[in-house]
Image: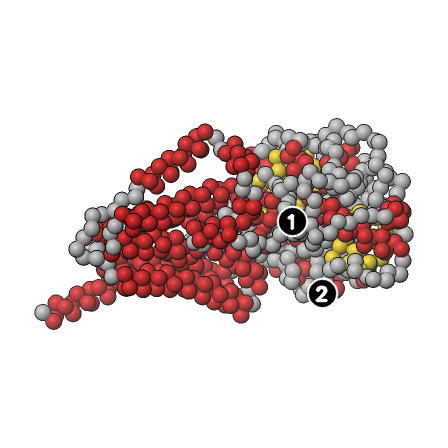
Amino acid sequence: MDRNHTGKRIGVLLLFILIAGAIYFWEENHVRLLFAGISPFPEDDYWNTLVNALLRDVLLLIAAGLLFLRRKRIPDRVQRYFPAVVLGAAYLGFAWYMQQKLALDSYFLTTLAIFAGLLNNIVLVILAAVWYHHNPSRLNKAFYFAVYFLCAVAILMDVVYFWQTSMHVQAVFFRNFNIYAIQGVMSSFSKTQLKEIGGCILAILLLFRVTKPRRHKPNVAWALLAVLGFTLLFNLLYFTGSQLGLYALHESGFWSEEQIEKSRQEYRDMLVTPVAMNIISKAAFNKEKVIQATQHKKKELTEKDKEWMYKLGVMRKPSSQPLPSPAYDRIVMLVLESVHRDYIHFYNKDIPAEATPYLDSLIKRYPRIDNYYSSAIPTTEGLNATFRSQLLFDGDVEGADKPSLFRSMQANGFDGYFQSASSRYYNSEFRQYTEQFGMAHYEAREDLENAGYSGASGWGFHNDEMYRRTLEQMKKLKGQKFFYVTKTLDMHQPYPYYATKWADTPESFRNNQIVSIHGMYWVDCTLKAFFKAAEEAGLMDERTLFIITSDHNPHSGGEYTELVKNEKDRQSIAPIPLIFVSKNLAPLENLDNSAYSSQIDIAPTLLCLQGIQPPQRFIGRNLLQQYKEPDCALGFFGDKAYYFSRDMQFVDKIDEPYPQHEYEDALANYVMYTYYVSGLPGDKLQE
């Protein structure tokens, strides 16, 4: 008897070891394949992913083991608590949809969040069921049904809201809740969709089933302790695991991954949210930050302010010159990361000529702007200036009704695409960019991975893969009208990425310890390969314009100060490259390559190039047009406005109580005035 018992234990142990080994080898092989082909091999990313996958498997095995041990009771519990099972199944379906929509990984913390969210969303129904089965009566049955129905309808309501906004129900929904809002929402659904919603409500009603009263009644105290205990346990495990994960990344020095994880955690928390309680709290309390009219103070420009702005060229008299016919059918903007103009040999002889030969050739052959400045930093602010022709970015101001380059192009028959090398969770790009900039199509690191691309590590996908994706998308869109932006990452500070081998690096800087020079050589090589492939594929024609620029200049410090010697060119706002490449250069013949300009000027320039009237809120100018006012570059960073022109340059502190010159005070007023105007609702533009 003892031998048989011992034999069973040994058998179970061997089976456990076999299963554990099989899981490990399968996960290890799967994770290694994810990073195959990346050179150098990202050991840190590899181990982080593998440990996450194994922890998830352990969690699932524990859950499966507990269910197996209690397998005889499962049929009875399903029958007795059937409404809770229905609600749980609905939540799991919703959780799967959220995970897909937000492109969340399927590893440990996400799985733990789903377990916690499942309990959070069925706990009220389970407690109502326990109370009913302990005291079966019509009143308690009605209470049981009310709790079940309200929780189920809340999930249905939240699903619809999330489908439209990628968020749980917000307080703004209830602030705007009136008959007109209801009519507007109803009109946005098709008859088929309304029937589907009605069918879901009918199913909720029909699936409420209760068993007849039994002799054996649940122990309310024990049930309360068990249900609330497990709910609290999984929530504590999730939130503790989230914080420990961030702590481990911070202590390991993975700064970029830590920042991405912070943003990803915000989205993962949505899986844990108790939907019904969230809706009740949002209906009863408004704790969200709202910029009130008293905070977003009205600002006006005096006649003296306007006089100085015209003298400086910041403001310009309207032109009566008619807009031309659309010059191009396709515009492709390649946005480099943190590249200063003087990182290119053509502009800076301290950069070896062999480091940027292709960029040098493009600059010599094609139109460019030599004094093109960033208007803001970091990336989101720089892109805001590029796409919305504004100096200040405020993510708390509603952006869906604000003009942008994407929205204007799309309103005139172009399709808008934005391809980001970084994670969609970095700085909440997934939500911020689509709302604020309005591109019709947005894809990031997670989307490229789902499409089968590899070659991402650290900050995100590398230039070669980003350009390969761009080319493949252009081939699919061949003959169509589109505005396509590819945002790369490989020059991200503090140390850029490059995949060129030592033996393939030119001897003139092969042993140079400045990483940014090697990074620029990689940028140069990948751009050369991109344009060569585009030419071979027939994608470079007279109706296609390519633009090479940067999201912003590098941040101060590090190698930046070693490469850019001129102090005035390495301020917080500094020159960045702007090159126009096309087989048809006639539309660009009026471009003055010596003009002073900045990122706020590119959107109105491209719109005018396409025969589209720029929105009134754009503060930049058309670089293809001659103005009576002087040309200038304008930027803003750290509560300071930066002004550059052929004749003068100055930095103005916005809140300076006693400015030295009138024009400094006028520029400060102008910056705050444009910020005020940019935040006004779409139908309340003040002239």
Kindly identify the residue that appears in the image at 41 percent across and 61 percent down.
235
Disc 2 residue type (three-letter): Gly
Q: Which mark is residue 280?
A: none
Q: Nearer the viewer, residue 604 or 49?
A: 604
User: With respect to residue 334, does 544 lie above or below?
Assistant: above
Query: Element under label 1?
Result: loop
Picture coordinates of residue 127, whole percent (x, y)? 32, 56
**Circle 2 or circle 1, nearest the eye:** 1
- Label 2 or label 1, whichever comes before in sequence order: 1
Q: Is residue 505 left or right of residue 281?
A: right
Q: Nearer the viewer, residue 638 or 307?
A: 307
Picture coordinates of residue 441, whole percent (x, y)? 57, 40
Q: Is residue 386 left or right of residue 233?
A: right
Picture coordinates of residue 351, whole percent (x, y)? 75, 58
Q: Is residue 71 visible?
A: no
Quarter of the figure with the N terminus: bottom left
- Would you name the residue on which mark 1 appears? 397
